[in-house]
Every structure is written in C-alpha cells, then in structure tokens.
Amino acid sequence: MPSLGVPRTHWPVVAWIRLRLPPPEMPMALLGPPPPPEPPLDILERNIVTTDPRKMIYAFEEETEFGVVRLVWDAEDPEVLEAELRAPIYNRRLPKGEVPRFWQAVKERIAPIGPLPVLGADPRP
C-alpha cells in the first residue's frame, strides 16, 4: 500500500488498515465546482505533497509505545481512511501480539466517526 503524503518518521509500514467512510455531504456551489470535502476527523491536518501541492492529503501521526500510528485521508478518495503503523521493524511483519494493540489504537482515534467497515488490512488480527 503506497503511503500518501510525507510521514514524519521514516520507519517502514509494518501494518495497515483501509476503512470505508460514509459518503461525505457535498456542499452546494452556486458558481463553479464545489469545494473539496472537509476531513472526516478534526485531528487530521494538511500534509503537503511536494511533488503535487494541489493534492489535498490530510494526516495525523501519534507515537505510541509500539510504533507510530498514522491516519491518512485523501480528498480525492473521500470514502477511504487509511491507518498505518510505522515501527523500527525491518524485513519481517508486525508480531501477532502487537496487531490487536494497533487495531485498538486506530479504533480509539476514529471513535468520533463510529465503527467503520474494513476494506483491507495487513495483517488481520
């Protein structure tokens, strides 16, 4: 899964989840195209893509005891929220005992939206 935007840490992605968001309410524009949708969570901040500054990528990163949890949302794909865990683990997957902790950390951060269906994940608990 390619990572969107520029993460603060350069550790590899050792686990990820793609979640389906409810369809956004599109604002009505009287003239011209409608403005891009707002991020689904208040914690998401604009994450500039240096190769294409027009892209509207929003991200949130938080360091935990088992790695950095990163949420990423792309305004061009407003019904998908991606969560990834970055940790200093090289050439292997996230240990099975850490997967439920990662999933729980993601659930806590998306709580204002509610439970979301999972589109894909690696690894699954």
Image (tube, helix red, strand yellow):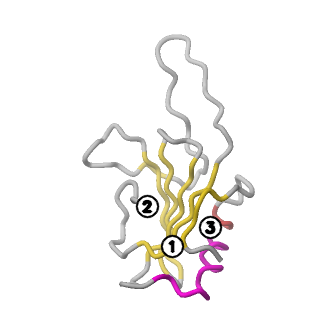
Q: Nearer the viewer, mark 2 or mark 3?
A: 2
Alpha carbon of mark 2 to alpha carbon of mark 3: how far?
17 Å
Residue 22 image position (x, y, % from top left) = 68, 43
Magenta span contains residue 41: no
Which quadrant is the C terminus positioned in? bottom right
> In the visual, does 115 lie left or right of 6?
right
> In the visual, does 70 lie left or right of 26?
left
Q: Secondary structure at mark 3?
A: helix
- Of the pair 50 and 80, the residue shown nearer to us: 80
Residue 1: numbered disc: 2
Taking 72 as reference, is 91 above or below it?
A: below
Question: Residue flagged by tag 1: what amino acid is it?
Answer: Ala
* Sequence-earlier tag: 3 or 1: 1
Residue at left 46%, top 76%? 14
Question: Residue flagged by tag 3: what amino acid is it?
Answer: Val
> In the visual, does 63 lie left or right of 96?
left
Read off the magenta span: 93-105
Residue 115 image position (x, y, % from top left) = 74, 58
Which quadrant is the N terminus positioned in? bottom left
- The residue beneath circle 3 is 106
* Sequence-earlier tag: 1 or 2: 2
Question: Residue flagged by tag 2: what amino acid is it?
Answer: Met
**Would you call the spot at circle 2 few (<14 residues within 10 Å), some (14-19), or many (20 or more)?**
few
* Sequence-earlier tag: 2 or 3: 2
- Using the rendered view, name the quadrant where residue 55 is placed: top left
